[in-house]
Amino acid sequence: MSRTTVLRRTRTVAVASLIAAAAFSLTACGGGESDSDTKGGSASATASGTSGGSGGSGGSSGDSGEGIDAKAGSASGGSSSASRCTTGHLEAAWSNFEGGPDMTYDRQQTARVVLKNTGSSDCAMVGFPGVQLQTEHGETWDLRRTDDKPKPVRVAAGGRVTVDITFLASTRDDDKKFAPDQVVITSPNDRRNISLDWPYGGALLDQSGATHPGTFVGPVSTPE
C-alpha cells in the first residue's frame, strides 16, 4: 500500500470521527421539545405521592386553599451545584397573588402556586412542572406550556419558587365548561407529585382539545 493511500484513509477516519462527535454533542446538549407558539408542549401529572403514569388520583396532598405570600422565603436564579429539587422535599400551596382569581372575569388571569423547599439544604430546578386539572367526575386536562425559556433556579432550604397557571374562566351559560376539583403538580424532571384542591370554585372554559388554548402553565421561577 502506498503512503498516499494510507494518508487518505487516515484523513477519512478522522473526519468521520469528528462528524460522529459533533452529532453526539448536539444530542446531549439539546433542550426539551417546545412548540413555536405560546401554548406549545404538553405537560402531564399523576396522582400525589405516586410515580409513573398519567391521570391517577389519590395520595397525600399539600396545603389546600390557603393563600400565602409568594414573596416569602428565598430563591435565586442562575446555575447551581445544588442537588435537584424533588417532590418529596417540596410543599405546594396557592398564593394570594393579586388577591386570587375572580371566576366571574371573562379575560385571562393567573392562579399562582408556590413550591416550598422543605429540605435541610439548597436544591435546584429548571423547566416546566406537569400540571393536570381533574374534575370530581374523573375528567382530566393536562395543561400545555408557554414558550417561555426556563431559567435555572436555586432554592434555599425554606425558600420558595412559583408556578403560574394562566386560565380563562367560563362566564357564559352556553360555554363548554371544565370545573376543576383537584390540581396535580409534578415538579420538573420528577415523577412524584403533589395534589391541591382547586379553591376558587367556578369552571374554566374547556379548551382541553384546542391547539392554542387560553389556559396553560409557565416554568418554575423566582418570586417577584
Image (cartoon, rainbow, N blue to C red):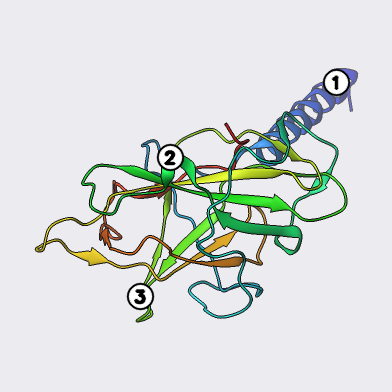
Q: Secondary structure at mark 2?
A: helix
* Vertical order, 2 against 109 (above or below): above
- Mark drawn on residue 7: 1
Residue 79: give x, y in percent of width and height: 76, 31
Q: Residue at x 82, y 55 (%)?
A: 119
Q: Which is nearer the N-term, disc 3 or disc 2?
A: 2
From the viewer's perspective, is 54 left or right of 203?
right
Secondary structure at badge 3 equals loop
Please say if 87 is above or below 56.
above
Callout 1 touching callout 3 (CB < 8 Å): no
Check disc 2: other Cα within 10 Å, few if <14, some if 14-19, many if 20+.
Answer: few
Q: For mark 3, does the 10 Å Cα neighbourhood hold few (<14), some (14 to 19), or many (20 or more) residues?
A: few
Residue at image location 66% in from the left, 42% down from the top: 126
Q: Which mark is residue 124?
A: none
Disc 2, disc 1: CB below 8 Å? no
Q: In the rendered picture of this protein, how many numbered marks are placed on residues?
A: 3
**Nearer-N-terminus badge (2/1):** 1
Disc 2 designates what residue?
98
Dot 1 amino acid type: Leu
- Dot 1 or dot 3: first in sequence order is 1
Observer-nearest of 149 and 71 = 71
Residue wearing tag 3: 139
Farthest residue to the top: give it. 4
Mark 2 and mark 1: span between their CA atoms? Answer: 71 Å
Q: Quadrant of residue 177?
A: bottom left
Q: Residue 199 lies in what quarter of the image?
A: bottom left
Secondary structure state at the residue bearing disc 1 = helix
Quarter of the image where the C terminus is located: top right
Q: Nearer the viewer, residue 33 or 175?
A: 175
